[in-house]
Image (spheres, helix red, strand yellow):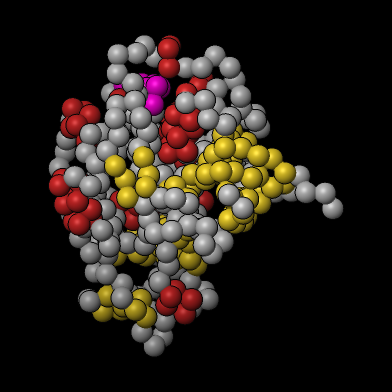
Amino acid sequence: MIELLERVGVLVVGAGQAGLAAAWHLDRAGVDYIVIDAGVRIGDSWRQRWDSLTLFTPASANALPGFPMRGTGRRPTKDDAADHLVWYARDSGLRVALNSPVTRLQVHAAGFRAAVGDRTIAADRVVDAGGSHRVARIPDFASTLPTEVAQLTSAEYRNPAAGPVGRVLVVGAGNSGAEIAIDLAHGGGEVLPAGRDVGRIPPVGTAAFALMRHVRAESIIGRRFIARTGGGGDPLGRVRPRDFERAAITRIGRVAWLDRTGRPLTVEGPVEGIATVVWCTGLAPDRSWLAPGSATTPPRCSRPAPSVPLHVHDPRVDDLSRAHAGRRRRGRSRADDRPTSLRLDGLP
């Protein structure tokens, strides 16, 4: 069997915000690269979330390098976010290959070799921009729930009409859990949201979001925010106590275990009559495709110059999943920031 081998300078895995922003900078620098993504369409990771999801940030705060988001001032929906990525890739002429899941990345000679479908891509460098929210984190005791109790994750939930049925326990009181619980209640279901109080982000205006674009993880403010939010659900960005009151639902305590009959246990005692559990207990990156030795510990990020993408200090795999990959150049028109050629493989 003949191996189909392609060679590039930089392989970018993931066509989300970070991957496309990294590609934009690589393209402008004249670096030979390709972005690969397992999705059928750019933005599918947004489209596959629950139907009522909207962004916390206004459109004006969601610009990608060289490309503002349409509809300044409004709160975009998940589909708006997906379309934003499609337009960005098209208008910027980024080289993207869809239907291209990477199944294995290995160190080879001076660089890497990635197994992508029926072909192999050799690259000098690899940017892992596959996203931080890919694999559901579910407690081990979930497998011991009675078989008649249906289970799904926040990534699988779509809307009340598509299920779940019966009395629903939503485990996890972060943003996903709170919003899904209210969505189910508005659909007429009986809902019990369970989890600790994660706090709330104070209401802020558009100017505050513009300021946050300049806050870095290694700054004093950034370190404090990470310390306050690490290890649990992020503070609620949109839901407020009055929203639970209007939906006629009351949050119960954290589900810690199951009793002998398989009933979920909280500090208040067992939860009776549960027909469905929606796990909103967090999502994690998918690193199953990284062979041993192909990546090191999470990289350390440095503050970029205005026209330079965030630099990652890691000699092997650069992880941009949690990093803002760059900012639009100052003093340049938007038209100047867009290449005229269209190099987009596999878009409908």
Which stretch did the figure color magenta? 65-72
Q: Give coordinates of residue 257: x percent, y percent.
A: 34, 79
Is 2 displayed left or right of 38 in the figure?
A: right
Magenta stretch holds residue 28: no
Quadrant position of residue 194: bottom left
- Give the residue drawn at x 76%, y 44%: 4
Q: Is residue 151 visible?
A: yes
Q: Nearer the viewer, residue 248 or 22?
A: 22
Q: Is residue 164 visible?
A: no
Q: Nearer the viewer, residue 54 or 312?
A: 312
Q: Give coordinates of residue 107: x percent, y percent.
A: 58, 56
Q: Give coordinates of residue 172: x percent, y percent.
A: 32, 61
Position of residue 51 relative to residue 144, above or below, is: above
Is 127 displayed left or right of 200 in the figure?
A: right
Q: Give coordinates of residue 142: x percent, y percent.
A: 44, 74
- Give the residue drawn at x 34%, y 13%: 332
Position of residue 284 relative to residue 329, above or below, is: below
Magenta stretch holds residue 69: yes
State the residue lying farthest toward the right. Answer: 1
- Magenta residues, dominant SS class: loop
Q: Quadrant of the C terminus?
A: top right
- Give the residue drawn at x 61%, y 27%: 344
State the residue lying farthest toward the bottom. Answer: 260
- Give the residue drawn at x 47%, y 17%: 338
